[in-house]
Amino acid sequence: MRLSRNLCVGVAAAALAALPALAQSAVSQPSGVKHVLLISIDGMHAVDFYNCSHGIAGVDGGNPYCPNLAALGETGVNYVNTESSRPSDSFPGMAALASGGTPKTTGLYYDVAYDRSLDAPAKTTGTGLAAGPCTPYAEPTGTTTDNDQGVDLDDTKLNGGAPGAPLTEGGIASLDPLKLVRDPQLGCAGVWPWNFIRVNTLFGVIHAAGGYTAWIDKHPSYSFVGGPGGKGLDDYYSPEVDSNVVALPGVKTLDGIPCDPIRDTASLSGWNSSFENIQCYDAIKVYALLNQIAGKTHSGAPAKVPAVFGMNFQSVYVGESVNEAGVASGGYKNAAALPSAELLNEIEYVDTCIGVIVGALKDAGIYSNTLLIITAKHGDSPIDPTRYVADGTYTPATLLGNMIPYSESPLNPTGIGATEDDVSVLWLKKGVNVETAVDVLENNAAAIGMGEIYYGPSVALDYNLGGLEPGEDSRSPDIIVTPNVGVTYSNSTSMIGDHGGFAHDDTNVILLVSNPSFKPATVAAVVATRQVAPTIVKALGLNPAALDAVRVEGTPVLPEVIGQLGN
């Protein structure tokens, strides 16, 4: 029996054992906290918050430029040495925040990864993962796993192609069951995102204890945050960020700019490709969040104010990483993280949104009993613009070629591609010798800009040993290559940064936990974003050990936060 199966059985048994005690304790708050609002400003580094709250030469005369975030810092604990997940992709990054676990426990390494125990989908995904055979209860072939926009019914539409859905709606109704990878040991049933994650989540724990839960994100596939069974979320909203840009009648940005007509008609193939359009995209999510703060569903129907809820912002990530031809280039001006004009505008925009959100909490009379957590799923690399290198010719996957599965290989002209950004996560074909593949990479280290290589024990130390034999994990990679800072494995001229890697710029993210009763504090000790999940559960009066990954990995709460709450 594979390690992944053993892990699932073990955590499920422990969770079942905890259910009676959990069910008897409705969400309670000895600290007075009744709501936790979690916000991920994707891409935002700890240094971005430092600069915008203190000021930096070259911006507005050295004055601070994020007054709303800075105000939260006056009643908050600021963790300046916070590490995101590794890999620092959004998928494992969100899993860390929601579950308290690393990829070795959650099973989520990347939105596009690989699983030796699964088979291809019945229908080719929107991002190019080819359909393939699946024989019930037979030996699996192994397949790339697509949990990105490719599993939508129609990822060109903001509603994901959900039948009869309004313009921005869709949610899980826009997932195409034929595009899901399949499990032969379950009769070739498709693996829904919420069953792809191997452990439960804070949303599931709080929901099981009687709390109302909600989340807002960028893809329908991020509904995995509800946890196994898909019952952990009462309200989920996920307009597709990679859809074609359309006018949004009646919608204005949070600083009052109409989104009808389309603000930037030069970039229509995705909201993430435009500095202006991404602000309209984030706006529709903020308005959904404001509905939830007011005691409604994201779409405005009567509901409860969630015990735990939140959203992610895309604007800062776009400001960091996009080079929009004929418009402007984002990113930074130097290694001190001086923002470009475009990035500055995105930081200021998100700060405006934060101000509106805080104002809504106050208007609803729940600001004092809400714990507000501002963090990021990932950072972005490089900050120093002189270090950026985009080379898709010499990448680890390109060099290994036929040694890796065809669904992952760059030799596949129509495939989804290798799991490479500013990291290369590699799964080898069955029978390929790992040391042989490593020799190929090390003999071409300069050509691929290789910084470090992990395999065998150096992978198993932080993850699980990959494979299908007893004691091995079907999802763990055989090799991980982290390139030199600034090297990205793409030929993209539309990007000037990326994420996924292990570098400081990728992983050192903002983490600010605020409540009006808090005394300000700055913590320099190393913490991790996965500590957010047990902290939320504890803040709402529940036992963090109800989280599977917390028990397996021993993930601690953030003690400075729990200490201020008096829990």
Image: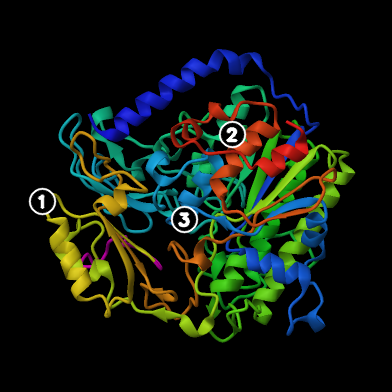
Q: Is residue 450 magenta?
A: no
Which numbered marker is on residue 155? 3
Which numbered marker is on residue 431? 1
User: Which amino acid lies under the numbered mark 1 shown in the image of this protein?
Assistant: Gly
Label 2: which secondary element: helix
Q: Is residue 160 left or right of residue 115?
A: right
Label 2 vs label 3, nearer the camera: 2
For the point 68% across and 70% down, which residue is it? 346
Range of the magenta residues? 410-422
Label 1: which secondary element: loop
The answer to whether 15 is drawn above or below residue 362 in the figure is: above
The answer to whether the residue labelled 3 contacts the one labelled 1, judged by CB atoms less than 8 Å apart, is no
- Residue 526, picture quadrant: bottom right
User: Which amino acid lies under the numbered mark 2 shown in the image of this protein?
Assistant: Phe
- Can I make out residue 407 in this image? yes
Tally of marks? 3
Q: Which residue is mark 2?
A: 203
Could you tell me residue 507's position as x and y percent? 52, 60
The answer to whether the residue labelled 2 contacts the one labelled 1, judged by CB atoms less than 8 Å apart, is no
